[in-house]
Image (tube, helix red, strand yellow):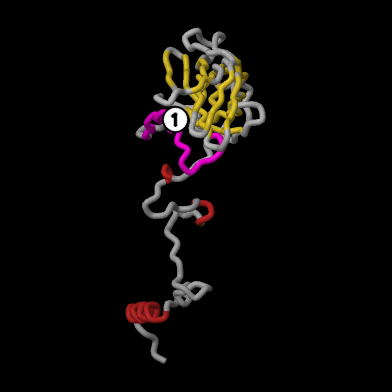
Amino acid sequence: MTPLPPRRAVALCALVLLAAGCGSGGSGRDDAGGPATRVADQGGLPPSAAGPTPSFGVTPDDLDTDAPRYGAPSAGAEIPDRPAVASRDCSGRSGLLVEPGPVDAAMGLRAMTVTATHCGTGTFRLYGYPDLKALDDDREPLDVRTLRGTRQITTGVPDPGPHAVTLRHGESATVSVVWRNTYTDTTHPAVDAPHLRVVAAPGAPARTVTPHGGVDVGSTGRIATTAWKKLTRDR
């Protein structure tokens, strides 16, 4: 057989490759019988080392993350508006509805309301102070004390003191929760509790609320609460 000139041989091989998919080709279909998947170049690394590529229209900043949220928001981050006052809406609900109000901050003093609304049948009785527990991201208790009465934190929030409060269906009661964001112990990180567990009365079910901005007690290690006070219908 007469050997082909080099240029003609290269051209012929190219035609064969296009027609038959030779080289490393295969059939152009995957093992399941569907179209073969093409893997994009990831900087010379195998796909497992380069990491997953987000779906189209999704950036890494849009994905959920388990990273703590104690730090300042990143540049350009959108900070949500402060929550409205408690809805006190029993529509479609039963039992005890517990809702946080917005956190007011001034000169390191924090204050917010917690509202309990009776959405069950019969009456619900409260007396004195709720049991509060600051929780971390995993909803585990933090080393934060709860004081009954607010005088050790501030004299600017009146406490009605323990007294009986009876709620019928749709009625509500409220407490004020106060703390100070003071950080003086640099040997330990500042405490910022994203959640607050509320037990309105002994034997009542625990409810967990997530105040806007969290409960940032710094190194003070304490929060304080007033006693329950019934809300009138016009509030």
Q: Residue furthest bottom?
A: 1
- Inspect the magenta stretch and tell me whether residue 95 lies in it: yes
Residue 203's x, y, as percent?
Answer: 66, 30
The residue identified by callout 1 is 86
Q: Is 54 drawn above or below residue 17 in the view shown? A: above
Give the image quarter of residue 86: top left
Residue 6's x, y, as percent?
Answer: 36, 79
User: What amino acid type should be assigned to the residue bearing mark 1?
Assistant: Ala
Quadrant where the C terminus sits is: top left
**Residue at image x 45%, y 70%?**
36
Residue 107's x, y, as percent?
Answer: 43, 12
Does residue 187 appear anywhere in the picture? Answer: no
Q: Residues within 10 Å of mark 1 (few under 14, many from 20)?
A: some
**Residue at image x 57%, y 31%?**
123
Give the image quarter of residue 205: top right
Bounds of the magenta span? 78-96
Does residue 175 appear anywhere in the picture? Answer: yes
| In the image: residue 75, left or right of residue 184 | left
**26 vs 173, nearest the viewer:** 173
Main secondary structure type of the part rendered in magenta? loop
Q: Residue furthest right?
A: 203
**207 vs 78, nearest the viewer:** 207
Look at the numbered disc 1 and give the secondary structure of its residue.
loop
Quadrant where the N terminus sits is: bottom left
| In the image: residue 57, left or right of residue 146 | left
- Inspect the magenta stretch and tell me whether residue 104 lies in it: no
